[in-house]
Amino acid sequence: MTASTPERVAVTEPAAALVRELTAQHGPLMFHQSGGCCDGSAPMCYPVGMFLTGPGDVLLGRLDVGLTEPVEVFMSASQFEYWKYTHLTIDVVPGRGAGFSVEGPTGLRFLIRSRMLDPAELLSLGLA
């Protein structure tokens, strides 16, 4: 994203701290916002290369979590059609992580907090 383009995704400091811990264990990570099924709609965290993205996925953004490389966040294009007016923040809370997401054994789970994009953000993204 450029300086004039609003970010679509952010991360809280507690979630960023967990990403740093998990990166030390698993190597570089990425997120894919799941669209339902077994784990509901949750941000799934995978080692880079363990979940393959393609033309059916949208890159929502790159998170600066204090590592040398940003952490990319994706969503399926069909799900993005429903969420394109929304800003997402990845957070972490106590609980059981999603079955395939790397935070599963930690006693914490990633979750999404969302808000509607404001009129200026919508305009900047060409959605107004």
Image: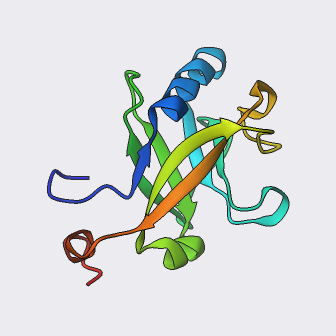
Q: Which residue is at 75% across, 26% downward? A: 106
Front position in the image: 26 or 92: 92
For residue 73, side relative to residue 76 (left or right): left
Name the residue at 54% across, 34% down.
Answer: 15
> Horizontal placement of 63 versus 32: left or right?
left
Residue 28 visible in the picture:
no
- Relative to 26, is 77 above or below? below
Q: Residue at x 34, y 69 (%)?
A: 117
Q: Which x, y percent locates residue 1?
A: 26, 53
Q: Position of residue 9 (x, y in %)?
A: 41, 53
Q: Residue at x 57, y 22 (%)?
A: 23
- Which residue, as the protein is rendered here, is positioned at the far bottom? 128
Q: Residue furthest top?
A: 24
Q: How is the image coloured?
A: rainbow
Q: Residue furthest front?
A: 94
User: Does any portion of residue 15 appear in the rendered image?
Assistant: yes
Up-down relation of residue 35 to residue 68 (above or below): below
Q: Position of residue 95 (x, y in %)?
A: 77, 38
Would residue 47 be found to the left or right of residue 89 on screen?
A: right
What is the quadrant of residue 119 in the picture?
Answer: bottom left
Q: Quadrant of the C terminus?
A: bottom left
* In this picture, residue 79 sits left or right of residue 67: right
Rendering coords of residue 110 (x, y %) = 64, 42
Q: How many marks?
A: 0
User: Which of 8 and 96 lies nearest the eye of the viewer?
Assistant: 96
